[in-house]
Image (spheres, rainbow, N blue to C red):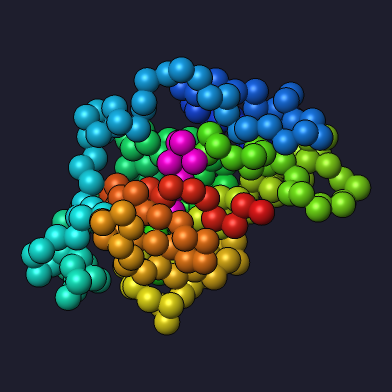
Amino acid sequence: MRHALLAASIFSSLSLAAAIYPFDAIRNSGSTPSPLIAITNQPDHEAQAQQQNPIMPVDQPDQPSSSSSGPSAENPNPDPSTSSSTSTLSISDILPQTRKINIFASLTRDIDSVTTRLDSTNPSSNTTLLAPLNSAMQSLPRKPWEDRPGDDSSVRAESNEDKAAGNLARFVLEHVVPVSPWLEGRENALQTLGGRRLWWEWERRDGEKVRVVKPGDLIVDEVVGRVGNGEVWAVKGVVNYE
């Protein structure tokens, strides 16, 4: 009974993503790595999100603001007290409304520690959430709950709910930076809740100034929300997916 309840908890939130992007969540997990989600000829949901998403992006990092309160070459880390923060909302409030990252958002609901943190209004729980775009999740070489290459454990995730739950939690925790605002520079490197040490820098890519999370050169597509307990950064890739 415990395993049945745990299995239901692990994969229940995937139903939303499956309804939008059809994929086989469990059964297609053989030895040959397969994409997380089948790519189909569907409309570009990320483009539609720009028109349908009720949460307005805040000072997009790709196009730094020239104002004194926004990021710029002279002031890349704006004073959070002067930014457009919605202090009465939490990260959990805006995640379901941000379509371009809703696949990853659905996974966060299965990790109790993450759900509690994203709901919290305690300043010690402020968070910068690195949320992979749907397109990044679609292109993964294996599902987040599957075993990593080189894992020679006798317990396999495809046949053990506890192992699958651990793999999924590790994937999500690698994207949770336990601070907000998160200052630029290697000297401000921090460990994610998954243990990966990260920092970010402004860089010019293809003529545009963008935030890049390092190591791994993870480009920030935009800051999709800034609320009372932190920020959500939509990123064009995933953290530490070896």
**Closest to the observer, 68 or 176:** 68
Q: Quadrant of the N terminus?
A: top right
Q: Quadrant of the C terminus?
A: bottom right
131 vs 76, left or right, is: right
Give the residue drawn at x 52%, y 66%: 215
Q: Residue 165: x, y in percent? A: 69, 44
Residue 229 visible in the displayed image: no
In this view, the residue farthest toward the left is 67
State the image quarter where residue 178 is shown.
bottom left
Q: Residue 72: x, y in percent? A: 18, 68
Q: Residue 106: x, y in percent? A: 49, 36
116 vs 92, left or right, is: right
Q: Residue 148: x, y in percent? A: 74, 49
Asked if residue 115 is among those painted magenta in the image, a careful observer would answer: no
105 vs 95, left or right, is: right
Depicted 93 relative to depicted 72: above or below: above
In this view, the residue farthest toward the front is 206
Give the residue drawn at x 32%, y 67%: 202
68 vs 136, left or right, is: left
Residue 62 visible in the displayed image: yes
Give the residue drawn at x 46%, y 75%: 189
Q: Which residues are magenta?
A: 130-136
